[in-house]
Image (cartoon, rainbow, N blue to C red):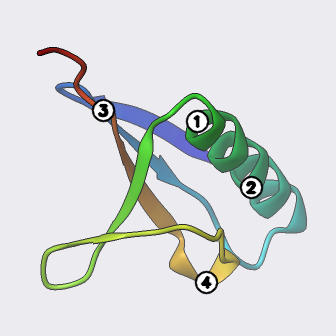
Amino acid sequence: MNVSKEGAKIILTWRKDDADDVAKARDFFRNLTKQGWLATRRSGGLQRILDFKAEYEELIFIPFVEGG
């Protein structure tokens, strides 16, 4: 599993054939989404992801902006 930052975004990558990598990535996904981060995936644009799937192999987390 690899975590990197691109500005305010967090990029998570893992190997779908490595059970340990998948478990760590799933936990990371759950933790960030519980904190209010928006999970997305590149698919001709950004597509919101609500459920973790090992075959994605990459997710991009975007923070919600608060303000008013």
Please, what secondary structure does the residue beneath circle 4 have? helix
Q: Residue at x 40, y 47 (%)?
A: 38
Crowding at label 3, few (<14), some or many (≥20) Cα neighbours within 10 Å? Answer: few
Type of amino acid at the residue the image marks with label 2: Arg
State the residue in front, 65 or 14.
65
The image quarter in which residue 16 lies: bottom right
x and y percent of residue 30 in the render?
Answer: 71, 46
Question: Would residue 25 appear left or right of 59 to someone viewing this image?
Answer: right
Q: Nearer the viewer, mark 2 or mark 1?
A: 1
- Could you tell me how far apart the alpha carbons at marks 3 and 2 are, in whole angstroms? 20 Å
Crowding at label 1, few (<14), some or many (≥20) Cα neighbours within 10 Å? Answer: some
Tell me which numbered mark, 4 or 1, is placed earlier along the sequence: 1
Q: Which residue is mark 3?
A: 64
Type of amino acid at the residue the image marks with label 1: Leu
The disc label shown at residue 26, or none: 2
Q: Are marks 4 and 1 in contact (CB under 8 Å)?
A: no
Q: Which residue is mark 4?
A: 55
- Could you tell me how far apart the alpha carbons at marks 3 and 1 are, in whole angstroms? 11 Å
Q: Residue at x 74, y 55 (%)?
A: 26
Q: Residue at x 11, y 15 (%)?
A: 68
- Could you tell me how far apart the alpha carbons at marks 2 and 4 are, in whole angstroms? 12 Å
The disc label shown at residue 32, or none: 1
Q: Nearer the viewer, mark 3 or mark 2?
A: 3
State the residue in front, 24 or 50.
50
x and y percent of residue 36 in the render?
Answer: 50, 34
Q: Are marks 3 and 2 in contact (CB under 8 Å)?
A: no
Tell me which numbered mark, 2 or 4, is placed earlier along the sequence: 2
